[in-house]
Amino acid sequence: MKVISFSEPRFVRAILEGKKTQTIRPLFREKLIEDHKVMEGFSIGGAEPKTTGKMMKVLLNKEPRFKVGEKAKLMFKQRSTPKDSWFCLDCGSILEVKRPLTKDSVGVPIIKREYWYCKNHGERNPHTNVFPKHFATVRINDVFEIEMGETRKGKYLGFVHKEDALKHAKSLFRMNNTYCYNGIMTEFAIADGFIQHNNQSPWAMLEWFHKQYNLDQPKRFAVYGWTT
């Protein structure tokens, strides 16, 4: 079964509470190629494009990884931590099981009460301050493509395909060849777990993606929605 892995502690509570119902993942990869290959198939006056021997970085789009109807495991730090790990709910650090030793009245070593220990927060309450590596198994119920980028008017998020946008709203407007609607940022920020309190701005989501992926150049992403 495929896995959707998370590494940001900020989203954990929203996942556990069922408030995060989708995830946005990159649909592109960067590749270095010789500059003349970028121009292949294009010529001016029948002349063949010339190479300078320099390398250029280009973005290649990929297909979405999931299809509607597939099942997926939601996990935290899937590849970088052991299978049965538990984590601190406040910082996402992996927990240790502490078994403090002491001695009884005649000097025989005994183990006192075991407890979960976080390197940043000390002893953790197993009922309120910890969470497991495997959150849940879900069914993918929505898959579509979006684009995020920046124009002179500011950053934007829009649907790549009109039919996907029409499932969310009937009144659309265009933004850099994508399909948008009023309230799109708030809707996405709530579903993706970026808004968990009333005083949080939906635009914080775009700022986060800009820091992660540099939206100065428009980039495509897949959105995977799920139900438990």
Image (cartoon, grey):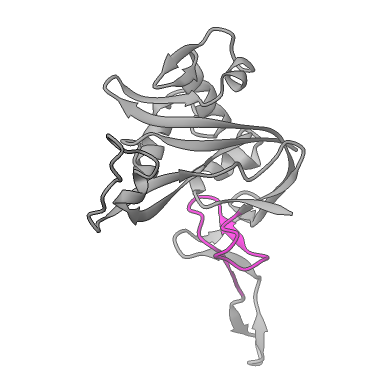
Q: Taking the image as drawn, is residue 214 in sight?
A: yes
Please determine whether, in this image, residue 52 is positioned above or below residue 119: above
Assign the magenta stretch its main secondary structure: loop
Q: Taking the image as drawn, is residue 104 in sight?
A: no
- Residue 196, position in %: x, y? 52, 31
Q: Nearer the viewer, residue 193 or 124?
A: 193
Q: Is residue 51 left or right of residue 115?
A: left
Quadrant for the C terminus in the image: top right
Please determine whether, in this image, residue 134 is positioned above or below residue 149: below
Q: Is residue 185 left or right of residue 79?
A: left
Q: Which residues are magenta?
A: 76-98
Q: Is residue 226 left or right of residue 77?
A: right
- Name which quarter of the figure residue 87 lies in: bottom right
Residue visible at 61% across and 15% down? 166
Quadrant for the N terminus in the image: bottom right
Q: Nearer the viewer, residue 57 or 202?
A: 57
70 inside magenta stretch:
no
Please determine whether, in this image, residue 111 is positioned above or below residue 69: below
Residue that protrudes farthest toward the left in the picture:
52
Residue that protrudes farthest toward the front in the picture:
46
